[in-house]
Image: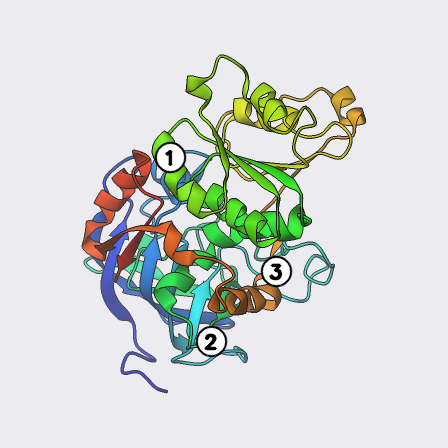
């Protein structure tokens, strides 16, 4: 398949971040040709997750490169490929992934590890790996616009390292598959790959945003006997029930600590697995204390902008509880995501649950505000 744009610089619409906390501006931008081992994509669907929101607000050091094109949860088709790309071609349905898999480094070759040495997630990265240059430019004066998280999907076209692109079977609906490029995969993978939840287990999920609900979906699919959801917003509880959560705790409406309530619900033993998806040090402490003192595991998924350190005394780890963190649910994107795609096609996970709004691309600032105000799980933007 050959497209009319192949071999040419493309001018298209992109939502450009000119400064921290400023409204994104819909601009005409130039998108350069893909270079060696790069792929140029036409983005069809993108959505906003809290990592984009954090970068937009200027947290975690992401404010150091402006102007910038944010976005990393998306789906699209390959427009053209650069020299050396063998595993995809123009017209292929794909997901851009914010943390890549080169297949050659010691991390990629090691089972159970997924932070590729060359293409791992890096919020400070602003240019392409191959030549240290950007592929975006302003249409008026040809000034550089910087990249974000290996992907930059708030643009009708983007250039991505081929190590950060995963093919999708064309039978799969891309609007739903876009959720698997970040949030849903992160939560489900934390339940399956990192915690390895066993049938009959008890689980507590702290923070019922898209990632937290994905954890619950993963736990339900694994046969957890009890899933407890914790959130200060009770409006999230109905969706939690759809994801398999049977018990809910609102910390603002309890005269006891959350871990005390979890102990009551579990008959005093605590849960075997807890997941911190709120980005709160206080929630992390409660999640840790909510686990069973003999076998409990806490998995950290929330983005923490606070400079505070872990609220755990080293001696507490000798009580049989453990704590770990998960990036992209422990998935190796190229080698492991295709199986997850197939499982979704078979109905193992309910992806419809996560799409709370659908908006045209031009309304991206409205989508940002909906997420910022806690009124949305995922706003699916159609480009």
Residue at horizontal 37 percent and vertical 67 percent from the top: 174
Report x, y in % for residue 18.
Answer: 27, 43
- The residue pinned by badge 1 equals 58
Q: Are marks 3 and 2 in contact (CB under 8 Å)?
A: no
Nearer to us in this view, 218 or 132: 218
Q: Are marks 2 and 1 in contact (CB under 8 Å)?
A: no
In this rendering, the answer to whether 256 lies above or below 14 is above
Place residue 317 in its image quadrant: top right
- The residue pinned by badge 2 equals 169
In this rendering, the answer to whether 86 lies above or below 338 is below
Quadrant containing the C terminus is bottom left
Residue 285 lies left or right of residue 252; in this view the side is: right
- The first of marks 3 and 2 along the sequence is 2
- The residue pinned by badge 3 equals 332
Residue 6 lies left or right of residue 214; in this view the side is: left
The CA span between labels 2 and 1 is: 36 Å
Report x, y in % for residue 233.
Answer: 37, 29
In this rendering, the answer to whether 284 lies above or below 366 is above
The CA span between labels 1 and 3 is: 29 Å
Furthest-top residue in this view: 255
């Amino acid at each position: 398949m050959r497209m009319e744009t192949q071999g040419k610089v493309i001018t298209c619409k992109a939502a450009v971040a000119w400064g921290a906390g400023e409204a994104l501006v819909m601009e005409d931008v130039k998108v350069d040709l893909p270079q060696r081992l790069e792929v140029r994509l036409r983005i069809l669907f993108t959505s906003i997750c809290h990592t984009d929101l954090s970068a937009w607000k200027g947290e975690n050091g992401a404010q150091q490169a402006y102007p910038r094109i944010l976005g990393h949860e998306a789906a699209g088709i390959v427009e053209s490929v650069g020299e050396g790309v063998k595993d995809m071609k123009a017209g292929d349905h794909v997901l851009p992934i914010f943390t890549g898999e080169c297949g050659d480094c010691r991390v990629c070759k090691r089972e159970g590890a997924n932070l590729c040495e060359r293409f791992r997630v890096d919020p400070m990265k602003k240019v392409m790996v191959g030549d240290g240059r950007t592929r975006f430019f302003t249409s008026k004066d040809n000034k550089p616009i910087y990249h974000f998280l290996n992907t930059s999907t708030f643009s009708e076209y983007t250039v991505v390292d081929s190590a950060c692109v995963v093919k999708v079977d064309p039978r799969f609906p891309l609007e739903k598959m876009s959720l698997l490029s970040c949030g849903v995969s992160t939560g489900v993978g934390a339940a399956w790959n990192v915690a390895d939840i066993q049938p009959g287990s008890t689980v507590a999920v702290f923070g019922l945003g898209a990632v937290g609900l994905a954890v619950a979906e993963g736990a339900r699919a694994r046969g957890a006997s009890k899933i407890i959801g914790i959130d200060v917003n009770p409006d999230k509880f109905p969706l939690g029930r759809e994801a398999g959560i049977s018990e809910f705790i609102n910390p603002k409406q309890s005269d006891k600590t959350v871990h005390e309530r979890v102990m009551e619900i579990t008959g005093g033993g605590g849960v075997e697995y807890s997941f911190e998806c709120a980005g709160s040090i206080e929630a992390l402490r409660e999640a840790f204390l909510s686990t069973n003192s003999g076998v409990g595991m806490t998995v950290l998924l929330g983005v923490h902008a606070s400079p505070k350190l872990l609220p755990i005394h080293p001696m507490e780890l000798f009580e049989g509880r453990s704590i770990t963190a998960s990036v992209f649910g422990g998935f190796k994107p190229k080698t492991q995501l295709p199986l997850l795609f197939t499982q979704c096609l078979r109905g193992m996970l309910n992806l419809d649950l996560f799409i709370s709004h659908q908006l045209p691309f031009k309304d991206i600032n409205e989508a940002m505000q909906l997420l910022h105000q806690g009124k949305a799980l995922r706003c699916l933007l159609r480009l």
